[in-house]
Amino acid sequence: MELYLLRHAKAVVRGAAGYTDDSTRPLTPDGAKTMHRIAEGMRELGLEFDLILSSPFTRARETAEIVARVFTAERNLKFEDALAVGGNHRLLIDRLTTEYRSYKHVMLVGHEPSMSALVSLLISGDPDLSITMKKGGLCKLTVDSLKYGRCATLEWLLAPRQLIRIR
């Protein structure tokens, strides 16, 4: 399985007027524009996604929808509470190994620090390895047999700026 972990793009700042509920904060106009350019860079890399699983939080959902549109993969987009802020990695991995086990190219769209902790957990067995995922950053892991703990190889971790330059 190839796992692609994507941090949502730039969103309206926490506590901004009109967004007292963190789950409703959308992407900024610049964040949406940048994410579109990032997705075009991903397409230029020849990536493909059988499944795009996203946090249901607005900023992650909007990020995932942009990727799905660029890849003409709207039908492959699903939302997963285990990817929300405070989500459960064990539950996510359980769903990936049962419900979604037939998918080979899976994108996960979520939040920090959860995305870095998940990368860390899967490549080292320890969720506290110091990894930085920028907003709009993308990581590729390869996994032979997904489990909770060390099971993946880090193929690459790209900053948004690098992805934009590809296109």
Image: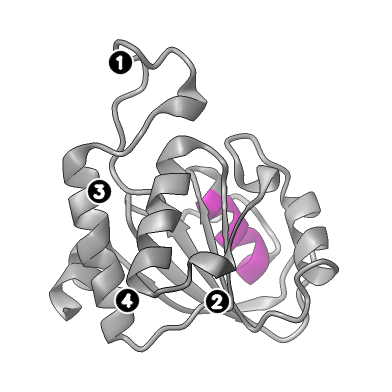
Q: Amino acid at mark 2?
A: Leu
Cβ–Cβ below 8 Å for labels 4 and 3? no
| Residues shaded magenta | 115-124
In the picture provided, is 102 more to the left or to the right than 48? right
Q: Position of residue 12 (x, y in %)?
A: 29, 29
Q: Amino acid at mark 4?
A: Met
Q: Position of residue 15 (x, y in %)?
A: 36, 14
- Cα separation between marks 3 and 1: 18 Å
User: Is 152 above or below relative to 25?
Assistant: below
Q: Is residue 122 magenta?
A: yes
- Residue receiving disc 4: 42
User: Is 3 above or below relative to 149?
Assistant: below
Q: Earlier in the sequence, mark 2 or mark 1?
A: 1
- Cα separation between marks 2 and 1: 35 Å
Cβ–Cβ below 8 Å for labels 3 and 1? no
Quadrant of the rendering where the N terminus is positioned? bottom right
- Cα separation between marks 2 and 3: 25 Å
User: Which SS type dominates the magenta stretch?
Assistant: helix
Any mark on residue 141, and which? 2
State whether residue 132 appears in this view.
Answer: no
Q: Earlier in the sequence, mark 2 or mark 3?
A: 3
